[in-house]
Image: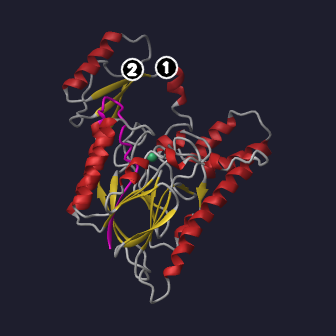
Amino acid sequence: MKLLHGSDFHVGLANYGREVEEFGRSFDAFVDTAIANAVDLAVASGDTFHGRRPGPKELRIVAAATRRLVNAKIPLVLSTGNHDGMATIADPDSQTLGWLDAMQLDGVYVGIRPMVIIVPGIAAVSVLPYAHKRAVDDPGLTLRERTDESSRILEESIAELSRRMTTFDDIDHPYVRLPRVFVGHLTTESASLGAEAAMQMGWDTTVDPAVFDPFDYAALGHIHVGQQVSPKAWYAGSPDVHGFGEEADDKRFLLVDVERGRDPIVTILPTSPRPLIRRVVSAAREWTEVDEPFPEGAVVELRLRPSGKMDARVARDLVDAMRKRGALFVQTVVEEPEQVRSRSRALEAEAPVTDQVDAWLATQDAPESTKARAREIAVRALSVQ
Ligand SMILES: [Mn+2]
């Protein structure tokens, strides 16, 4: 069985001069790729929409693309993400994708609650909607205990879904040969986070990726850096570059060959996100100098690093020159001397997560034992966007 796995489309996001349609084109490309590869199943692992109240353009884009999959007779399974989940916690009627579920389109399965979906002749699919950690908010527990407790509940929910599938193990069961697929939007303990995500420190529930071992493939969403986290579990990542710090990440869909009882065979299909590039113009150079060419339509972050007072007109000329060379959008950042000094600090986006946590803890006034414990929790519970 061949499936196409995409995730974190964020249709509705429009930043750096980009239109809503741009992120929509990635969802269209996902459908085109599914049809071109004649897959048996398409899987979108959450955050299809960027917001819980998608506007008419976003709805139209997703509805039209979904219709094309229906016409091509390719089943589609969607899970919900943190961006397009319930508007009200614990109220399934407030699910962003509720309208799509209500339409009951042939072969379109929306995971607005935990469920095992039988896609006839293709796969048995366990879907787990995004589980918000606030759903486990026992005020009697410490933050550490709450984080552990929500991880335990999440792992138990996944184990329960895989247990439900063990009823198919009987050799005479009609579903015994069906590949078992998991679809969900969550963080795993071993995943490396995106540069942007690493800067947004917070608390998020994490699961041990070993919990996916009973499945033949786990199609994960939430972390925007595409990666494999266990023999069975992969993040497709976002097909678009959302912001600076992730401009060097490879963006992709995953074409996956899944059979019952063996590890998945995954082929990475690169997407074509709009290039985001950084250009630093330092005081050591002439202000008017923009000698490096960049791709047509690029979003450019122009970092000005003046040693003295900067002439605003010169900065404007630089932006104009970049636009003439084909930049879609130029964001100007003037680095203050303090920022220039801070560049060497570990809080640089390129630094490993542990260094960033250490750098932050170094600024905190707390006993070393508390810091050590905070470090341990922070490193394993770093949240993502
Ligand atoms: Mn996302």
- Determine whether 307 is above or below 12 in the image: above
- For mark 2, give the secondary structure: loop
From the image, which quarter does the N terminus lie in? bottom left
Reading the chain from its start, which is encountered first: label 2 or label 1?
2
Does the CB distance between marks 2 and 1 fall below 8 Å? no
Specify whether residue 271 is in view.
no
**Residue beneath the point at 46% across and 22% down:** 335
Judged left or right of residue 366, residue 135 is left
**Residue beneath the point at 31% across and 19% down:** 286
Residue 96, picture quadrant: top left
Q: For the residues carrying marks 2 and 1, which lies nearer the camera in this image?
A: 1
- Determine whether 41 is above or below 309 in the image: below
Q: Position of residue 72 (x, y in %)?
A: 22, 62
Q: Nearer the viewer, residue 18 or 41?
A: 41
Mark 1: which amino acid?
Glu
Q: Nearer the viewer, residue 93 or 253?
A: 93
Q: Residues within 10 Å of mark 2 (few under 14, many from 20)?
A: few
Mark 2: which amino acid?
Ala
CA distance separating discs 2 and 1: 12 Å
**Residue beneath the point at 30% across and 13% down:** 314
Q: Position of residue 349 (x, y in %)?
A: 49, 39
Magenta stretch: includes residue 203: no
- Determine whether 19 is above or below 353 in the image: above
Per the rendered image, the range of residues in magenta is: 1-20
In the rendered structure, find residue 336 and report the number of the disc placed on it: 1
**How many numbered badges does the structure rendering display?**
2
Specify whether residue 43 is in view.
yes
Judged left or right of residue 52, residue 208 is right
In the rendered structure, find residue 283 and report the number of the disc placed on it: 2
Q: Position of residue 73 (x, y in %)?
A: 25, 64
